[in-house]
Image (cartoon, grey):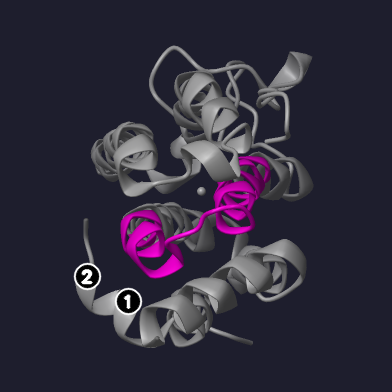
Amino acid sequence: MLSFTKVITLAAVAFGALTQAVPLAQRETGIQARVPGDVSPASHPTIVSVFADLTVDLDVELCALTHVTRENSTVVDVEPIVVKVDAILKKAVVAVEALVDISAEDSCKDKDGVLVNIEVLVAVIVDVVLAVVVALKAVLVVCVDLKAVVAILARVVVTLLVLIRAVLKICVEVYGEEIAVRVQAFLGAGICAYVFAAVNVAISL
């Protein structure tokens, strides 16, 4: 089975030298937090609660990125929003890394102390990643100064990967390599692959 670190390797290869920037993850109308009734945040921080907070914090900024047009896609227009998104993601990284203070299993439980189903946890992670990637794609397809704008968007891509790595470092202790393989498959296909490749091409120009 693949190591969880292959998730990072897969995405890193997609945009080559961009990974050297480490460290610095929506639908078109905003994110909807995937925290179903029996998977609510516990009394102590958990992966689910961190991602629920992240979803709420990102909503406005990602929505703004999805509504960028050719006329307001310059570095001056985009950078302030991207800086906020990057800061929000970094805050989530810190929150996930702080989960070291509790056991990996407790980090993956719901409010009732029940271990979250692997399918639900993968969905929680993937929802946020997809939200960020959709927002980045919206900017990529309209921006005029592609190389300059992508250099800014790259910060978010790298921070997103750091967040994924931090989460999977905990999750593989509980669910094994299966959760890493599932997330890896998502990162290597569809819109994620498109955005990573676009970033790589623009950085290489």
* The quadrant where residue 114 appears: top right
Residue 102 appears at what percent x and percent y?
A: 31, 36
**Amino acid on which disc 1 is placed:** Leu
Can you tell which mark lies on residue 18?
Answer: 1
Question: Callout 1: helix, strand or loop?
Answer: helix
The secondary element bearing badge 2 is classed as helix
Along the viewing direction, whichever of 109 and 179 lies nearer the viewer: 179
Amino acid residing under circle 2: Ala
Residue position marked by numbered label 2 in the rendering: 21
Question: Taking 39 as reference, is 205 left or right?
Answer: left
Q: CA distance from mark 2 to mark 1?
A: 6 Å
Q: Position of residue 56 (x, y in %)?
A: 52, 18
Label 1: how many Cα within 10 Å (few below 14, some 14–19, many 20+)? some
C-beta proximity under 8 Å, tags 2 and 1: yes
Q: What's the magenta region?
A: 127-154
Q: Is residue 175 magenta?
A: no
Residue 105 at x, y percent in the picture: 49, 43
> In the picture shown, does residue 175 fall above or below 68?
below
